[in-house]
Image (tube, rainbow, N blue to C red):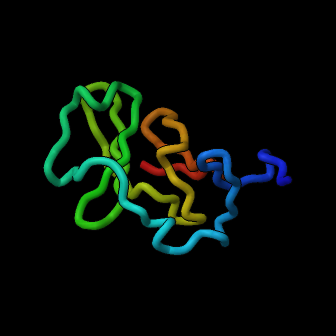
Amino acid sequence: MRDPNDCEIVNLGRCHRDEDLTMAEKKKLAGPDLARGVSLAKLIDGGMLQGHAGGEPVLVARRGSSCFAIGAMCTHYGAPLAAGLIVGDTVRCPWHHACFS
């Protein structure tokens, strides 16, 4: 059995490494269609919401009354940024803490 601390992605109790995922799995669209809009009530201050727009995964983060949108996947390793942290006005990658804003 693999050590869960050795995982790069943990999903429903299964451990996966980035190289084990297909491109379709990495780019899986989830959440609301953000091009249609979304209620601010679904996005609390300091929160993130993963959705999609134009066939691409998008992450929306809220700070106070402002919302910011970035690509939902880390451009370095493909990590899901929704699993990361908001620090100041940046989203940090959950795998290697790269900053996105």
Q: Position of residue 92 (x, y in %)?
A: 55, 45
Nearest the camera: 67 or 47?
A: 47
Of residues 12 and 10, the one nearer the viewer is 12
Q: Quadrant of residue 16?
A: bottom right
Outermost residue toward the left? 36
With respect to residue 71, does 63 lie above or below? Answer: above
Look at 36% across and 53% down and name the residue there.
30
Q: From the top left corner, tell me how far across and down residue 36 is, in percent.
A: 14, 50
Q: Is residue 21 visible?
A: yes
Residue found at x 46% / y 72%: 24
Residue 57, by quadrant, is bottom left
Left or right of 52 in this view: 81: right
- Numbered circles on residues, count: 0
Query: Is residue 98 toward the left or the right of residue 23 in the image?
Result: right
84 displayed left or right of 49: right
Q: Residue at x 47, y 59 (%)?
A: 73
Q: Position of residue 21 (x, y in %)?
A: 59, 69
Q: Would residue 44 appear left or right of 96 to someone viewing this image? A: left
In terms of depth relative to the viewer, which is nearer, 83 or 85?
83
Quick check: can you spot residue 96?
no
Q: Is residue 19 above or below residue 10?
A: below
What residue is drawn where x is 31% and y is 31%?
A: 43
Q: Position of residue 7 (x, y in %)?
A: 73, 53
